[in-house]
Image: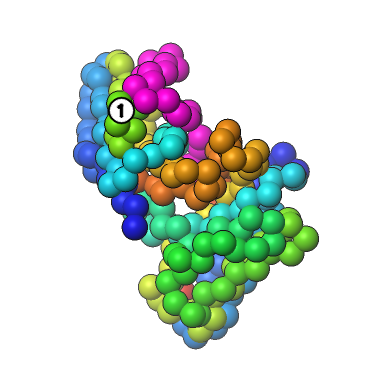
């Protein structure tokens, strides 16, 4: 079945440093979504990418969908302590509603 | 309601007992999903409903797990004869499925039910 892997599993940065998490699917995706889960919280939708090579920005966050639609990345510029949490990518295939969630990257930011 | 709600928020049970977890999706959302998340782990897909039917039950770990959805709204996840390894947070999500070719499948998650099996 479809598998979605993320690297790294965990990253610890100092506030102000940049952070990137990478998402790789074993199959071609129709869309990719990103979610953030704060410690003790539930996943919250951040963004959806649909087009090959698409790049979207949300303030300090930049999301990219690969040309082959099998990988994606999330880059955070100048991290802040509010960025702490686990970032999950989730891939959709075809028109089915089911998403396959990635393994997640836990980000820790210290002053 | 404004968001997905789940009850109970916490459940402590003894090994061997049955538990029922409830999910109330966002009004009008036709798709409903159950996930399990063990401590510090990712999201493990359990089952997905489209309306009252479950096209994908592939994630249910064993026949002790079952789920139903009635009236295209509330869903219950039942775990029979609970085991200690069932301890986890059970998350429910719902989405509005627009249709083929342009489906918006953004999932909105509830706060989860923390299940502890002693």
Q: Is residue A53 magenta?
A: yes
Q: Callout 1: residue from which chain?
A: A
Q: Quadrant of the C terminus of chain A?
A: top left
Residue at the disc numbered 1: A66
Whole-percent x and y of residue A82? Answer: 41, 26
Residue drawn at x 45%, y 29% is A50
Q: Quadrant of residue B9?
A: bottom right
Residue drawn at x 34%, y 22% is A53
Q: Secondary structure at mark 1?
A: loop
Camera-nearest residue between B50 and B34: B50
Residue drawn at x 56%, y 67% is B11
Query: In this orientation, does residue A108 appear?
Result: no
Whole-percent x and y of residue A68? Answer: 29, 31
Q: Which residues are magenta?
A: A42-63
Instruction: Classify 10 Å Cα crowding around label 1: few (below 14), some (14-19), many (20 and above).
Output: some
Whole-percent x and y of residue B110? Answer: 59, 48
Up-down relation of residue B60 to residue B40 (above or below): below
Name the residue furthest right.
B71
Up-down relation of residue A9 to residue B15 (above or below): above
Whole-percent x and y of residue A46? Answer: 48, 30
Q: How is the image coloured?
A: rainbow
| Count of numbered badges drawn on the protein | 1
Up-down relation of residue A21 to residue A53 (above or below): below
Camera-nearest residue between B116 and A24: A24
Query: In this orientation, does residue A12 appear?
Result: yes
Q: Quadrant of the N terminus of chain A?
A: bottom left
Is B3 displayed left or right of A85 in the figure?
Answer: right
Q: Quadrant of residue A69?
A: top left
Is B34 displayed left or right of A8 in the figure?
Answer: right
């Amino acid at each position: 079945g479809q598998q979605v892997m993320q690297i790294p599993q965990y990253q610890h940065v100092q506030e102000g440093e940049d952070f990137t998490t990478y998402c790789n699917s074993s199959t071609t995706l129709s869309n990719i979504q990103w979610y953030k889960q704060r410690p003790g919280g539930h996943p919250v939708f951040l963004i959806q990418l649909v087009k090959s090579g698409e790049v979207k920005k949300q303030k300090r966050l930049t999301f990219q969908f690969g040309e082959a639609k099998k990988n994606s990345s999330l880059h955070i510029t100048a991290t802040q302590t509010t960025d702490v949490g686990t970032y999950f990518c989730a891939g959709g295939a075809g028109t089915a509603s089911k998403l396959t969630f990635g393994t997640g990257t836990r980000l820790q930011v210290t002053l | 309601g404004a968001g997905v709600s789940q009850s109970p928020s916490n459940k402590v049970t003894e090994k061997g007992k049955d538990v029922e977890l409830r999910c109330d999706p966002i009004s009008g959302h036709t798709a409903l999903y159950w996930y399990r998340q063990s401590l510090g782990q990712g999201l493990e897909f359990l089952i997905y409903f489209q309306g009252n039917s479950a096209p994908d039950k592939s994630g249910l770990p064993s026949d002790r797990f079952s789920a139903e959805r009635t009236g295209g709204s509330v869903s219950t996840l039942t775990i029979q004869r609970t085991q200690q390894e069932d301890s986890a947070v059970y998350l429910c999500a719902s989405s509005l499925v627009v249709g083929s070719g342009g489906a918006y499948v953004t999932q909105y998650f509830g706060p989860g039910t923390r299940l502890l099996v002693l």
